[in-house]
Amino acid sequence: MRDDGAMTGRLGIEKRSTLPEHEAVYGPLPDVGKRHGRNPGVLVDEAEKAGLRGRGGGWFPTHLKLRAVVNSSADRGRLARTRHPVVIANGMEGEPASSKDAVLLAHSPHLVLDGITVAARTIGATDAFLAVHRDSPLVPGLEAALDEREAAGIDPLRIRLVTPPARYVSSEESALSHWVGDGVATPVFPDRPFQSGAAGRPTLVQNVETLAHLALISRYGGAWYAGTGASNAPGTTLVTVGGAVQQRGVVEVPTGTTVAEILRLCGGPAEGVRGYLTGGYGGGWVAADGFAEVAWDPESVRAGGGVIGASLLWALGDSVCPIDEMSRITAWMAGESAGQCGPCMFGLPSIAEDVRALALRQSYGGDMRRLTNRLALVTNRGGCKHPDGTSRFVSTGLQAFAAEVDAHLTGACSVASQRSTDPAFQLPVPAARLALLDTSGRDFT
Ligand SMILES: Cc1cc2nc3c(=O)[nH]c(=O)nc-3n(C[C@H](O)[C@H](O)[C@H](O)COP(=O)(O)O)c2cc1C
Ligand code: SF4
């Protein structure tokens, strides 16, 4: 990072940093001032000035979440057993096509850990956790980083590494809180974690990238932070770029950078691009036409027909059948539900069947009307947003690839004869995935 405003990346993802290297670049962890009763530490005001919005998918204003946890805790009174807040850093990266959080945690673990510490102090948390999924290759590096900090004695509160099951919904914030509190990684509703999270305590769940940005704000202030990026969501953002580009990977750019520029940083398209998947499997498809000029910030991406979500930009090349890819992913998403609400148990499998029939070119117009009805029926009806994300994934795909849908309805496919056997999107192997209930290695009540 440089002081002259030139962007070399604020988040330090270029190479792995040890604690001394991290402190040489960013300086020591600042004292942000702690919470007193209803008054959080000053970092909340700085986060508001910064305009920081969460990078876990929803881009929700971070200062509002910090304040909500403090108020929820203060409302319980001094004697309530469950009054002390909990912080959970969400490094689960449940979106299979995303790798931005893994890259951040592998290269700049101390910035994330700084963020956990300053967030905990600001809201008066007495327990702090960093969650990455079970069997994650990040675990040894994160344990080493935590050991470095313990030896240096820099964290007033011990940060515990936890490894919930690697399932799509186990990283939804209420599921993560449920797992930390009770060892069950299913979403809980209607209360949100700030109201009743881990073991019934007010719980702050923030994406690891959000916490890394918060650590920067704690050092350099909100005004500095807001000095770059789009006015609706200032700062920089990590973007996972995949699919038909010369060099797939993770880049850090100021929010508001155009899609064309992000693709250029990845060497440009590797073939003709038919469309883009934005945000993740719970995000949305857009047709390629005109999308390169769109700025990468939440509102501009939405206006361009997409969803910034977990900041995934995936170029779907001309050599791939979009309906085939949608079919595989929809079936996988249907299998990832927690099986506790109607839209997930009955709606998603039926939607997956309809998309499969379309991919196999066995559908006709009536089937499409049924699919459209089913997509509308699951929206806003689940305990969490999993059905909404899956429905949006399919409905935006049907719009973005309308010409290919029409071709399939007549029994044709524009790429069937030339397609390679490799699927474009990788999906975790179902057999390797774990159950949602697992209490091993937990010691938190
Ligand atoms: C099905 C589902 C899966 C999710 N998976 C993740 C995830 O892997 N990582 C993440 O940070 N947020 C994930 N989220 C969003 C979280 O629920 C939560 O909003 C986020 O961690 C909050 O952090 P932020 O405010 O810093 O964005 C998921 C949401 C849903 C509905
Ligand atoms: S909507 Fe689906 S994933 Fe979400 S809580 Fe209900 S069953 Fe679980």
Image (cartoon, helix red, strand yellow):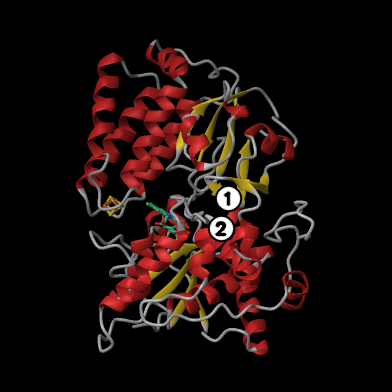
Residue 280 left/right relative to 16: left
| Residue found 32% across the figure and 76% down from its top | 73
Looking at the picture, tell me which residue is in the foreground, 426 or 223: 223
Q: Is residue 204 above or below residue 99?
A: below
Type of amino acid at the residue the image marks with label 1 = Pro
Q: Could you say whether the residue bearing mark 2 is in a helix, strand or loop?
A: helix
Residue 435 showing in the rendered view: no
Residue 278 spot, x, y in % from top left: 51, 38
Does residue 208 appear in the picture of this structure?
Answer: yes
Q: Could you tell me if the residues under marks 2 and 1 are in contact, i.e. CB atoms within 8 Å?
A: yes
Please state the horizontal and vertical placement of residue 443, each as a whole percent of the image: 40, 84
Query: What residue did someone put label 1 on?
Result: 234
Q: What residue would you read off at disc 2?
A: 50
Q: How far apart are the alpha carbons under marks 2 and 1?
A: 7 Å
The image quarter in which residue 272 lies: top right
Image quadrant holding the C terminus, namely bottom left
Residue at x-position 75% and y-position 36%:
267
Q: Is residue 276 above or below residue 56?
A: above
On the image, the x and y values in percent for residue 349 come to 29, 39
Percent coordinates x, y for residue 430 in the rendering = 43, 51
